[in-house]
Image (cartoon, helix red, strand yellow):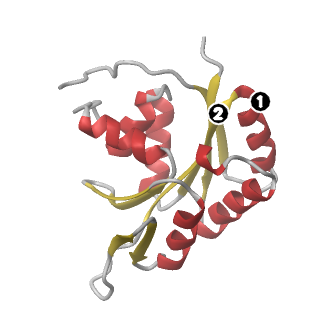
Amino acid sequence: MSNKQAMVAIYTTHTEAEGAVKELQRAGFDMKKLSIVGKDYHSEEHVIGYYSTGDRMKYWGKQGAFWGGIWGLLLGAAFFAIPGVGPVLVAGPLVMWIVGALEGAIVVGGLSAVGAGLYSIGIPKDSVLKYETAIKGDQFLVLAHGTADEVTRAQEIIRTTHPSEVGTHELRTREPVGATS
């Protein structure tokens, strides 16, 4: 049994999610073990896009200031256009888990790219579906991973920020059900 875990907290607004990230940072949580994911809003009046200048990401969109700040704190950044969900932005190690699932041609029935990334690290499919529903509903996920002790500490900090829901999961690599390559 692995000693690695992940804690996933759901927040209804980007302000709440950003507050949680900043609270974890203030408490000394390793920012390399933290991810955030959420949807941005497509609008015909605003340009949506991102670009990289050196090691800094820039993003244009309704929540550009929020994502710019988050991408400055966390390692890794990505923008995905996911069918049925829309534009999704991700920061942190979750980016590499999603890319790994996509590059490995891992397809899990009924899951988006974000869901395939979460499932590939051991989060149960029923929980993944709940997290995808939260993203589709314009909510934000904050994910902390590490040893059981690190995740317990992160969960204690996160609970003070009043997420709408918090789940903890054992992490392990597994072959997705229905995987294709």
Q: Mark 1 = which residue?
A: 149
Q: Choose between 13 and 29: the one closer to the eye.
A: 29
Residue shown at 75% from the left, 41% from the top? 155
Q: Residue furthest front?
A: 54
Which quadrant would residue 119 be assigned to in this image?
Answer: top left
Up the image or down, 138 lies above or below 59; here it is above
The x and y percentages for residue 107 are 25, 32
Q: Residue furthest top?
A: 1
Please give the label number shown on residue 146: 2
Q: Choose between 41 and 36: the one closer to the eye.
A: 36
Q: Is residue 155 left or right of residue 95?
A: right
Q: Is residue 171 visible?
A: yes
Quarter containing the N terminus: top right
Q: CA distance from mark 2 to mark 1?
A: 8 Å
Q: Are marks 2 and 1 in contact (CB under 8 Å)?
A: yes
Please give the label number shown on residue 44: none
The amino acid marked with disc number 2 is Gly
